[in-house]
């Protein structure tokens, strides 16, 4: 398969560029770990991740081939963005096929694994529920979008219309992708504050840096639903539905 670097979606990058800045604010650098397998914190079911890291599996901002930033200074986004370039890589497996259609590319319809550099975006990761602060533990739901290291322009999205963290898709959509058979799954986020002295959640660790644990919902049937979008020319964003796949994954993102 021909592999290319999928850059952060243009609309997301543009939104970030024009967002109002907090004066004197610095966007935190991140460490972003991708797990090969995990036990779902809600259902206690063990999954093999469809999104896999390379041999290191940990992506640290500023290291070779890695940019990982939480855009807290951009009041309209609050996104966490990981951009991976050579010599680093990731892979996405499309082996768990839910729905295909006439727009599904041959490699996805075959259940292939795409490997290479890409960019991914956890929407509104810096969100704080009303009445709480970043010094506390809390949980919320959000959205997720990633490029796919495959020829063309095929973002993979989880854009459930009802996250608790307000956000829109980078191309302006506020709902599930058009003509999708299933609703995309919500993305669960557990926030753990820095130097948590007495963790309440089993996912939080005492004395650790500020951390977010991210995984797609598995309580619905089918579980972990993601939609592949076709944005190849002459189709423009948001593109068209190119099939749906079960995409389990588990990230642990920490402030450096």
Image: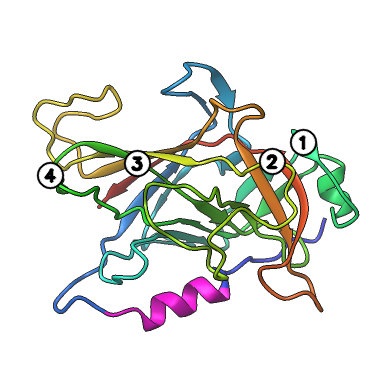
- As measured in the structure, the alpha-carbon distance from the residue carrying label 4 to the one carrying label 3 is 15 Å
Give residue 169's position: percent from left, percent from top.
53, 63
- Residue 182 - label: 2
**Bounds of the magenta span?**
10-20
- Residue 98 - label: 1
Residue at the image point whose x is 74% and y is 41% from the top: 94
Per the image, the residue denoted by label 4 is 135
**In what quadrant of the picture does the N terminus appear?**
bottom right
Give residue 56's position: percent from left, percent from top.
48, 42
Closer to us: 110 or 164? 164
Q: Residues within 10 Å of mark 1 (few under 14, many from 20)?
A: some
- As measured in the structure, the alpha-carbon distance from the residue carrying label 4 to the one carrying label 1 is 40 Å
Q: Are marks 2 and 4 in contact (CB under 8 Å)?
A: no
Q: Are marks 3 and 1 in contact (CB under 8 Å)?
A: no
Q: How many marks?
A: 4
Closer to us: 175 or 227? 175
Per the image, the residue denoted by label 3 is 140
- Answer above or below: position of 69 versus 26: above
Closer to us: 128 or 115? 128
Of callouts 4 and 3, the N-terminal one: 4
């Amino acid at each position: 398969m021909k592999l290319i670097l999928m850059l952060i979606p243009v609309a997301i990058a543009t939104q970030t560029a024009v967002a109002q800045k907090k004066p004197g604010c610095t966007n935190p650098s991140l460490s972003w770990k991708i797990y090969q397998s995990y036990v779902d914190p809600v259902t206690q079911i063990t999954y093999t991740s469809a999104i896999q890291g390379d041999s290191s599996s940990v992506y640290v901002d500023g290291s070779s081939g890695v940019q990982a930033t939480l855009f807290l200074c951009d009041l309209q986004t609050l996104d966490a963005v990981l951009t991976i370039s050579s010599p680093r890589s990731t892979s996405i497996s499309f082996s768990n096929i839910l729905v295909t259609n006439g727009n599904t590319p041959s490699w996805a319809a075959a259940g292939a694994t795409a490997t290479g550099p890409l960019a991914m975006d956890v929407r509104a990761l810096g969100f704080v529920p009303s009445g709480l602060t970043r010094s506390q533990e809390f949980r919320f739901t959000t959205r997720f979008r990633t490029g796919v290291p495959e020829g063309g322009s095929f973002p993979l999205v989880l854009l459930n219309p009802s996250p608790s963290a307000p956000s829109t898709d980078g191309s302006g959509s506020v709902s599930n992708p058009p003509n999708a058979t299933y609703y995309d799954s919500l993305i669960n986020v557990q926030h753990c504050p820095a130097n948590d002295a007495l963790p309440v959640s089993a996912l939080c660790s005492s004395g650790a840096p500020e951390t977010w644990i991210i995984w797609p919902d598995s309580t619905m049937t089918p579980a972990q639903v993601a939609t592949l979008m076709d944005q190849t020319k002459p189709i423009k964003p948001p593109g068209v539905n190119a099939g749906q796949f079960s995409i389990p994954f588990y990230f642990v993102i920490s402030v450096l």
